[in-house]
Amino acid sequence: MDLSLGPEDEAFRAEVRRFFDENLSEDLREAGRKTGGVFADFAAGLRWHKVLAKRGWSAPTWPREYGGTGWTATQRYIFARESTAVDAPRIFTMGIRMVGPVIMKYGTPEQKAKYLPGIVSGDMVFCQGYSEPGSGSDLASLKTRAVRDGDDYVINGTKIWTTGAHVANRMFCLVRTSTEGKPQDGISFVLIDSMDRPGLTVKPIVTLAGDHEVNQVFFDNVRTPVANRIGPENAGWTVAKYLLEFERGGDAYTPNLHARLEDVRRIAREEVADGSGRLAEEPGFAQRLAEADLAIQALEMIELQVLSDLSKGRNPGAVSSQMKIRGSETAQAVDHLGVEALAWYAAPFEPEARLLGHNAPTVAPDYGLTAMPLYLNNRAATIYAGSNEIQRNIIAKAVLGL
Ligand SMILES: Cc1cc2nc3c(=O)[nH]c(=O)nc-3n(C[C@H](O)[C@H](O)[C@H](O)COP(=O)(O)OP(=O)(O)OC[C@H]3O[C@@H](n4cnc5c(N)ncnc54)[C@H](O)[C@@H]3O)c2cc1C
């Protein structure tokens, strides 16, 4: 797609490329290349976050007054495209992408001063404690209880599927502060300032691809100050919904999709089609690559519109649900092509090959090491951030008026 960049945007792109040339070290690129899930190796991602923070580029979507870049929608998109093109590690961004915008909107001046600089610098790493066993799509039924005791809430219950709880040092979570009235009306949004609080336990859940990304978190009389509540007591549902719009629409899908499709093209250029020529030249496969490319370009048009709205302070609304559906389903289609292109070389289970610095021989070719892990990991993309069925329900109500 021709972004038709003006001279200023061309200059910005050149500046970004120069910065990557000078600052994105080979080991960080390796972490980017070997990513088999949503985020790169955590330590590598954090190192890259700190490099970006030093340059003032760690919060591309934030306004300058809070330490963000203040970039236009086009600049943000250029940055995202250039990042994926050079295998910059995907950073664990729940702070920047989710709780940061919430604190900007609903936080007190003290809360903004306490948290926003730490999120920008990478010193405060948040995970998201929304889902519970039995409360995923029906999130308002959540049961983790917070009871006031002096200046603290005392929390009991459990959260599940908590991505990165084992590497984060903070958590934002939804807790039940009242059982009166509608379930939505008894929820509060609180921050927990340390994952080492007494009574808080993190237990790993290892995924199908063999990776440890998600966890179950248990609360046994965990205390957090009432001052850590964002927004009024029992108004957490409004805060939570605001955050979900950013979770579903605030991130750029298509730069990553372009990069993933490029990886599949590379596999298809290397692999042979039924012993006759390269797979990339086989008409049936070439057509499917072209179809995936078109789907990504169509999504890119919507995405640029959403990014432009966001930069003008307009929330994406139900369009973020459309983006979530199309983005996740297109990613799964691209993953499928990658596995198909590699055929049996996709099958060997070689998680050690994705460890940074690993240089022993592998069964799968180096360009195919992440195809199967991405395929398996990404099965979850149509479930997390609100399942695609739930997104369709939102569109049915908010857009179609059904
Ligand atoms: C890899 C991964 C990472 C995650 N990370 C986090 C995280 O960091 N923090 C966090 O809080 N949560 C996280 N989640 C949880 C995620 O948000 C939930 O899994 C999701 O909301 C679905 O909830 P559930 O698993 O309870 O499934 P359920 O809600 O039980 O749904 C089961 C099935 O029923 C369908 N369904 C349910 N209700 C309806 C309906 N009304 N209409 C039509 N179909 C319906 C669903 O679409 C789904 O197919 C993560 C999940 C995964 C898989």
Image: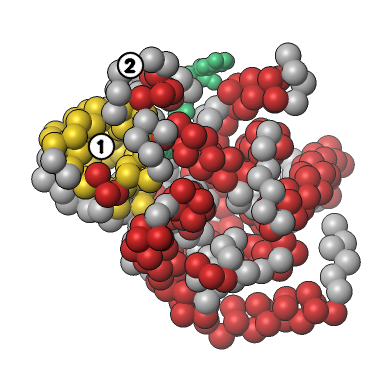
- Give, as a three-letter code, the residue at label 2: Glu
Indicate yes or no: mark 2 CB to ligand 1 under 8 Å.
no
Left/right of residue 215 with respect to residue 194 in the rendered view: right
Q: Mark 2 highlights which residue? A: 180
Left/right of residue 135 with respect to residue 292 in the rendered view: left
Q: Where is residue 98 shown, x and y percent of the image?
A: 48, 49
Q: Mark 1 highlights which residue? A: 217
Q: Are marks 1 and 2 in contact (CB under 8 Å)?
A: no
Q: Is residue 222 visible?
A: no
Q: Tally the marks.
A: 2
**Which residue is painted at 38% across and 45% down in the image?**
230
**Which residue is painted at 16% across and 48% down in the image?**
197
Q: Split into 4 quadrants, where in the image is the C terminus?
A: top right
Give residue 82's quadrant in the image.
Answer: bottom right
Give residue 226's quadrant in the image.
Answer: top left
Indicate yes or no: mark 1 CB to ligand 1 under 8 Å.
no
- Give, as a three-letter code, the residue at label 1: Val
Q: Where is residue 149 shown, x and y percent of the image?
A: 13, 37
Q: Where is residue 343 shown, x and y percent of the image?
A: 61, 40
Q: Nearer the viewer, residue 144 or 65?
A: 65
Q: Where is residue 106 shown, x and y percent of the image?
A: 46, 48
Say what secondary structure mark 1 lies in.
strand
Upstream in the sequence, badge 1 or badge 2? Answer: 2
Q: Nearer the viewer, residue 243 or 45?
A: 243
**Which residue is painted at 45% across and 31% down in the image?**
237
How would you rate the neighbour count of disc 2 (Cα within 10 Å): few for under 14, some for 14-19, many for 20 or more? few
Say what secondary structure mark 2 lies in.
loop
